[in-house]
């Protein structure tokens, strides 16, 4: 049986200028305060995929620039504290990104 993987191609020229190619390829995890107990993240993948698939607000995109200086940051979304962190080992991601070889 052949396995097939669907890979979506996105035009990187449509990325905001603040997102460099290196930053776009950075793997991140976005999660809320209950992540320690549930283990459920809102998003795991590259910044590029997050921007193209989730279409976040501009202020959230601009916050990604903080990841060039530090491995994680937090911000408040309504009543919840959201954490964005760099994933050092993307091969550890389950499911959709488990095939990645870096």
Image: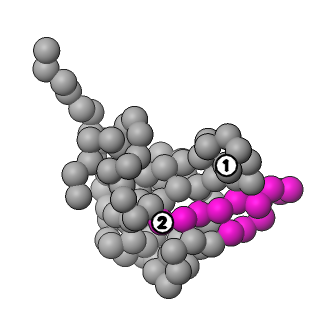
Front one among 92 and 85? 92
Residue at image coords 65%, 62%:
83
Front one among 81 and 18? 81
Residue 7 shown in magenta: no
Measured along the vertical axis of the image, is residue 97 above or below residue 27?
above
Q: Secondary structure at mark 1?
A: helix
The image position of residue 86, as x and y in percent, is 48, 66
The image position of residue 47, as x and y in percent, is 44, 60
Measured along the vertical axis of the image, is residue 97 above or below residue 17?
above
Where on the picture, by quarter, is residue 97? top left
Q: Which mark is residue 2?
A: none
Residue at image coords 58%, 55%:
30
Q: Which mark is residue 35?
A: 1
Quadrant assignment for the N terminus: top left
With 68 as the anchor, is 74 left or right in this view?
right
The image position of residue 87, as x and y in percent, is 44, 61
Q: Is residue 63 visible?
A: yes
What segment is highlighted magenta in the picture?
Answer: 74-86
Would you call the spot at circle 1 few (<14 residues within 10 Å), some (14-19), or many (20 or more)? some
Residue 80 shown in magenta: yes
- Labels in figure, total: 2
Q: Secondary structure at mark 2?
A: strand
Quadrant assignment for the C terminus: bottom left
Q: Which mark is residue 86?
A: 2
Where on the picture, by quarter, is residue 21? bottom left
Residue at image coords 61%, 42%:
40
With 97 as the anchor, is 101 left or right in this view?
left
Q: CA distance from mark 2 to mark 1?
A: 15 Å
């Amino acid at each position: 049986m052949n396995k097939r993987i669907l890979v979506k191609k996105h035009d990187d020229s449509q990325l905001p200028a603040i997102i460099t190619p290196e930053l776009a390829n950075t793997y991140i995890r976005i999660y809320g305060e209950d992540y320690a107990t549930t283990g459920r993240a809102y998003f795991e993948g590259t910044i590029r995929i997050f921007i193209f698939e989730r279409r976040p607000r501009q202020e959230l995109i601009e916050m990604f620039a903080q990841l060039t200086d530090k491995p994680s940051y937090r911000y408040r979304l309504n009543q919840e504290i959201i954490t964005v962190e760099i994933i050092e080992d993307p091969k550890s991601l389950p499911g959709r990104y488990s095939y990645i070889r870096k």
